[in-house]
Image (spheres, rainbow, N blue to C red):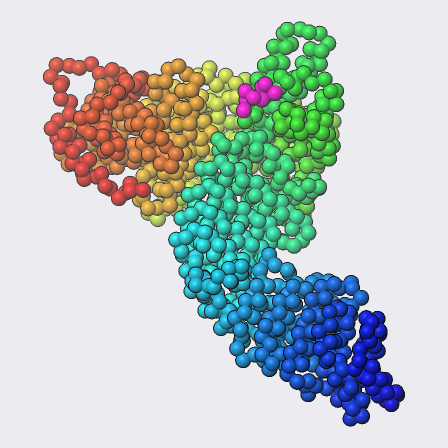
Amino acid sequence: MGEKLEQQLKEVGSKLETPPSTKDGLVKLLKQAATCLSELNQSPPASILEAMQPFLNAIVQPVLLKHQDKDVKLLVATCICEITRITAPEAPYSDDVLKDIFQLIVGTFSGLKDTGGPSFGRRVVILETLAKYRSCVVMLDLECDELVNEMYSTFFAVASDDHPESVLSSMQTIMIVLLEESEDIQEDLLVILLSALGRNKNDTARRLAMNVIEQCAGKLEAGIKQFLVSSMSGDSRPGHSHIDYHEVIYDVYRCSPQILSGVVPYLTGELLTDQLDTRLKAVGLVGDLFAVPGSANNEQFHSVFSEFLKRLTDRIVAVRMSVLEHVKSCLLTDPSRADAPQILTALCDRLLDFDENVRKQVVAVICDVACHALNSIPVETVKLVAERLRDKSVLVKRYTMERLADIFRGCCLRNFNGSINQNEFEWIPGKILRCLYDKDFGSDTIESVLCGSLFPTGFSVKDRVRHWVRIFSGFDRIEMKALEKILEQKQRLQQEMQRYLSLRQMHQDGDAPEIQKKILFCFRVMSRSFAEPAKAEENFLILDQLKDANVWKILMNLLDSNTSFDQAFTGRDDLLKILGAKHRLYDFLSTLSMKCSYLLFNKEHVKEILLEVAAQKSSANAQFMQSCMDILGILARFSPLLLGGTEEELVNLLKEENEIIKEGILHVLAKAGGTIREQLAATSSSVDLLLERLCLEGSRRQAKYAVHALAAITKDDGLKSLSVLYKRLVDMLEEKTHLPAVLQSLGCIAQTAMPVFETRESEIEEFIKSKILRCSNKIRNDTKACWDDRSELCLLKIYGIKTLVKSYLPVKDAHIRPGIDDLLGILKSMLSYGEMSEDIESSSVDKAHLRLASAKAVLRLSRQWDHKIPVDVFHLTLRTPEISFPQAKKLFLSKVHQYVKDRLLDAKYACAFLFGITESKSPEFEEEKQNLADIIQMHHQMKARQISVQSDANSFATYPEYIIPYLVHTFAHHSCPDIDECKDVKAFELVYCRLYFIVSMLIHKDEDVKSEASNKESISVIISIFRSIKCSEDIVDAAKSKNSHAICDLGLSITKRLSRMEDNSQGVFSSVSLPSTLYKPYEKKEGDDSLVSSLLTEFCFALASSFYRIIFFSN
């Protein structure tokens, strides 16, 4: 075999000395040579080398090395490559010849681009041989710098994803070897290498260059640093302008970040430069750098990252927005990165950015990350985002609501899949519900979110109920009220829509003008449920003209409480498809169909809730049991039809021993009993007996609901059953057993069945007065009395008062009830002494509880009997916060706030907040101040609405400032020393403080949104009221008029100071009609020109000067 190979080599060498004249002949000969050479191993025997020698000499003839045909050139290169392999490590040729050889070899690499060509394999062999045997190093010895540059350029030009990994690996090896063996890295070569970097470049070439840089970081660091510093300093050569140095930094950071340590100061400088374009580009670059996985651990870049985050406060919005976008990429790439807390802190600070688009983008970033990895965002951070629901920008508010719904929906899915176990985001629906009270939202928006966005599509009713139970467990009173308001509005619209559909059918049967009027009235009523009533009414008129029977059939089905959730969902979709998205009624019917439907809660929900009750009972989870009962109670009140078909389950639950379940079912029967009355009677005949027993022996709350349930489930409004019960209750009074429940039941019967109550009313009143209210309790040492130490007798007295109060608040015809004066006399004594009379003994705790209970009784009575409440009782009620126990103040002011906000109480009772003022730095003070501000703001809004529809804009009774006459009157009678007798200015300090407080709040009710015009209006009204009081006389005690006038002088001085008015300024001030129960026009008498003595003048000046900067009210 060896001899034959030697012979072939000799023959080929001999023939090649005089190359064939034809291409085919030459190609054939070269292929034969290449085949022979490929069969030889490295360092063959001497005889082989001797046989090769003629070929070695012939192959490097100029005619072959510089042949013009590409196929010939490739075969020549192949043969020479094999020769260098065989003879390695010895160079087989002279330097000059080797230069020509490498020129030839490098030239063949351009053909690597054609991966499908017939010559690709030979080129790969040449490449791999050059890499394997490191022959390329010889190029450095020969100083073939230009050729090396050409080879680098060729590799980057031809590198492709189509190449086998071995090809790219060989290219990489050659490039690395050349760099490692170089004494100095030529600038031109470095430029070629860096030119391949960048996200807009050939990805394979870019990856190849990055791999080379990573492997040769030590060799390249100095050159790359010099290049980047020159570029960033503006000193780069003109020929380098095609290289984007930001892209170079990005790619170098990804492969060898340590190279960039010297560039950090320059990068920081770009972040701080005044040139906006440069700063924006630097932000983009640094943001991209820190989105690279693992970047958070790069300590040498911490200073850059810190400055990058500071750009969130950049004065230019575009820069802040860019930082936000890149911060999002960072967190999405690695939500649990080490610097995530630092990033989130910086983001939270920008939730209060002055630009609405920035605030919106911050919400987007946090919510995007939360949706991507829920556990990566702390709950407290999401709660800060939720505060943007109160943003002054409608854009931000609406967007925040959408994104919070996205987070909750994601939470539901993760709970469903078991990826998270904690219900940390169940508070989100409550926050969304609170937006109902925001003028920029409305029930349309809120209900749309609750029905369509809150839960994942396809979520089962069972899963929805499971979440609703947890949601309800976290609702506060405001959130519950908001849901009730939505359901109440929904109920009203459903009822009116059913009435309209009936009228429409009648109208089609006969064109009666009277029916048409009723239809128009229905439209007017229903339109009030929409954000834009006028537009909704117009849309109803257009809807009435639709002839498609399918539309009306679907609407009827949606209004049917028996329609399943899936049927309602599908029906609504079908309705909108019938119209098409371009139809002018599309949006309107989308909202209307949602409001008409039972998508929010339906019968399937009720059945699942009842099953959930059983499940929570077995697990003894009282919180969730209560939540189930709360949902059933609210549905029974506003959607009683949904309880149909559950009568048997309700009765069985009523028999349960569990108090939560029993009380909840009683509430349901009290609200929905009238709707399910017949089915309930058919299901069980013992319901009446169960309810009666609870009226007699249950808890007070159970007794309350049981009485109302009895009235609801019987045809005669409970008169017969309540008459029998009433007799037993009155008889039980003397036995004094179960008195709390008995007194509760009697009070509820008075409210629901007054004819029954009146038959033995005198017996009940006498028992309460003589056997309860007039009883004394032995006083124990109560120097260390605690608020919770009230006695059992005190509780009975409170229950007795409540029963008497309820007897004057019947459901019907309360105003014709006689004898209210006697009850008000009892309440006056209670407010004055803490007992029915001064000689009754009891502890200070009991007296405080009874004063509080009596004050709350006055609040309740004022709904129907405000005109009957004497001024002295009103004054005593306002002074309830002065009770020595802080718990009493908190409970009373909370009740005032609640009743006024619910429009159940006149705003004049808000004066009570002024009597509760204590230490201004306490949390209680801030809460009370906020509650008073809520009341003032609400009445400003009410005033604006009333003025817009009234011609008499000077009707000051609608103004929140109208509480001032009541406040001045109370101060004059109870807080202000006699102006003629008191000589100490300090004695008036408390009056001044309280007056300053209320005037400042009325003038500066909302600094963020209040206009200058409305501010001036408030000042004008306040001054008009004070001046009107000065021109009036106290109708209760004329001697107190001087005090009132002095207080008004103080008020005027305070108002002028706060509004920065000149003492002699003249404004347009109207006369105000004051409350006729407090004031009458003052009749000037001779010698009465100066009601206010010189002391008062000195007093007003001293107070206004010395108290103006009182720290107490600096907030």
Q: Main secondary structure of the magenta part?
A: helix
Q: Which residues are magenta?
A: 532-539
Queried whether the magenta region covers residue 537, the answer comes back as yes
Image vertical order of residue 533 relative to residue 215, above or below: above
**Picture coordinates of residue 424, whole percent (x, y):** 57, 50
Q: Quadrant of residue 707?
A: top right
**Picture coordinates of residue 196, whole percent (x, y):** 59, 63
Q: Quadrant of residue 869?
A: top left
| Apparent side of residue 196 relative to residue 170 in the rendered image (left or right) | left
* Quadrant of the image containing the N terminus: bottom right
Q: 703 and 814: which one is in front?
A: 814
Q: Is residue 1005 visible in this depiction of the protein?
A: yes
* Quadrant of the image containing the C terminus: top left
**Picture coordinates of residue 83, whole percent (x, y):** 74, 82
Q: Is residue 666 visible in this depiction of the protein?
A: no
Which residue corresponds to the image point at 46% horizontal and 37% vertical from the top-left? Answer: 393
Image vertical order of residue 1067 relative to residue 441, above or below: above
Which residue corresponds to the image point at 51% horizontal and 36% vertical from the top-left? Answer: 435
Queried whether the magenta region covers residue 971, the answer comes back as no
| Apparent side of residue 797 relative to residue 332 in the rendered image (left or right) | left
Q: 503 and 204: which one is in front?
A: 204
**Picture coordinates of residue 1108, whole percent (x, y):** 22, 38
Image vertical order of residue 1112 relative to residue 81, above or below: above
Q: Quadrant of residue 581?
A: top right
